[in-house]
Amino acid sequence: MASTLKFTKGHGTGNDFILVYDQDGTMRITPELVAALCDRHFGIGADGFIRVVKSEHLTEGQQLLSQAPEAVWFMDYYNADGSVAEMCGNGIRVFARYLTEKGLVELPEGQVLAVGTRAGVKDIQRSMSGFAVDMGRWGLGDEVLVKASHLDVARPGQSIDVGNPHVVVALAEERELAALDLSRQPNIDPKPQNGANVEFVVPADPIMKDGTGFISMRVYERGVGETLSCGTGIVAAALATRNWLGSRAPNQWSVTVPGGTLGVRMFPTEDGEHVGLSGAAELVFDGEIEF
């Protein structure tokens, strides 16, 4: 007998998600179900699936609550192929939009919403453009080689961990960025154990203006393919570019992707440098589907 699933469709700069509210934490999620729902031809269609659930209902959430009792809600995130993901920068802003618009939480201006993820607790605030999320600390990894379709030779890539794994590749010009064929997965050498998202970045001319850095980016997301935007990838791209520029680089960045533009800010905290991501997050429609 078929079951009916109520869902909401949302997106952040074109990076789109299916959101489902699991009030008591009993929904059975399988890779096959997620892949079927995210299928753009036979399902609803999305880059990812988000279960909106209270932290107390999940083992990972319970572990976070012991250290951060304010993290009442947990973003249970899955890639379009059904694989589990640690974090999603666009997804968590859409998650915040869902919680506030559906009346599940109140988030006045200046207040902070703590959300549990598999990459730890993330703090979210309202911003002029939508929502801003503190992505926390980040880590610079090794340099690798990346081969991609329509790139003449393998290019060096900078590994960066922003809660999930990324490799950022610098390109010389917009023409090179536009020519990439990201219908095929780029090859990373050595291959990361858990895979990685791959970002291809081109600097603006000039790259800095009025204390802000400007870059353009395309991304191949692990478990999804090319997407119009990737929040954590945008953060990784800004961090890598700042690292390449050295001491003269700014801590404020504007990153343009096919789906729009998001802001990145690096700032000091008591436990080290954090990086924030800000931009729009929208809910598009509600629906029901039998599965």
Image: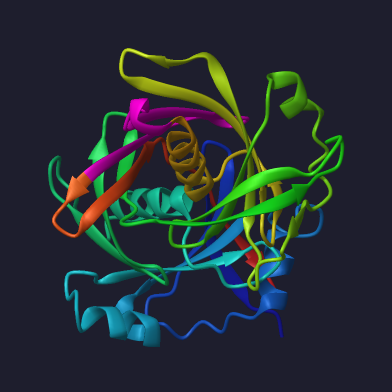
Residue 46 visible in rendering: no
Is 172 positioned to the left or the right of 85 in the image?
A: right
Q: Which residue is painted at 36% across and 48% down in the image?
A: 97
Q: Residue at x 32, y 77 (%)?
A: 55
Q: Is residue 261 above or below residue 67?
A: above
Task: Indicate the quadrant containing the N terminus: top left, top right, bottom left or bottom right.
Answer: bottom right
Q: Is residue 98 above or below residue 181?
A: below
| Residue at screen point 49% across, 46% down | 236
| Nearest to the observer: residue 137 or residue 68 | 137
Q: Say if the magenta span includes residue 257.
A: yes
Q: Main secondary structure of the magenta part?
A: strand
> 275 or 32, which lies in front?
275
Q: Position of residue 19 (x, y in %)?
A: 50, 60
Number of numbered callouts drawn: 0
Q: How is the image coloured?
A: rainbow
Q: Is residue 211 magenta?
A: no
Q: Residue furthest front?
A: 247
On-image quarter of the C terminus = bottom right
| Among the 4 quarters of the image, the one containing residue 262 | top left
Question: Above or below — where is 249 with respect to 222?
Answer: above
Q: Position of residue 126 (x, y in %)?
A: 24, 41
What is the magenta range? Answer: 246-267
Relative depth, front residue between 181 and 61: 181
- x, y percent for residue 29: 58, 80
Nearest the viewer among 56 and 264 is: 264
Q: Is residue 79 above or below residue 256?
A: below
Is residue 189 visible from the viewing direction of this image? yes
